[in-house]
Amino acid sequence: MERRFHNFKLLEQKLINLLLIIPQRIKMAKHMMFVMSLVAIACTLAIAFEPGPLHDFCVADPTRPGQGPY
């Protein structure tokens, strides 16, 4: 009978430890997801950056008459 009680105490202690660890792991997982989302946004912005934005505008060339800007 004493052995059963000892196993119950051990199980109870493990359960208490588990319940104390779970909130810490959830907090760590939330932090990791936040960091990963920031890295994903930064990578997307870095890939979409164009080093020469002047190419996006049409500039008239006065030396070529009759040619419209396309």
Image: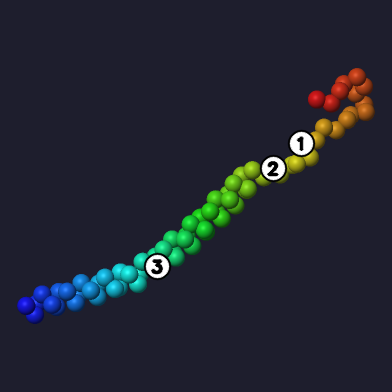
Specify the amino acid type for callout 2: Glu
Asked which quadrant contains residue 50, the reply is top right
- Name the residue nearer the viewer: 55 or 26: 26
Asked which quadrant contains residue 63, the reply is top right
User: Which residue is located at x 79 percent, y 40 percent?
Assistant: 54
Name above or below for residue 1 compared with residue 18.
below
Marks 2,1: beta carbons within 8 A: yes
User: Which residue is located at x 35 percent, y 70 percent?
Assistant: 21
In this figure, which residue is indicated by the disc labeled 3?
Answer: 23
Name above or below for residue 56 compared with residue 5.
above
Q: Is residue 49 left or right of residue 18?
A: right
Rendered image: mark on residue 3:
none
Quarter placement of the C terminus: top right
> Where's residue 68, x and y in %?
86, 23
**Closer to the eye: label 3 or 1:** 3
Rendered image: mark on residue 50:
2
Specify the amino acid type for callout 1: Asp
Label 2, label 1: how many angstroms apart (C-alpha)?
10 Å
Which circle's residue, 2 or 1, is located before the other in the chain? 2
Label 2, label 3: how many angstroms apart (C-alpha)?
43 Å
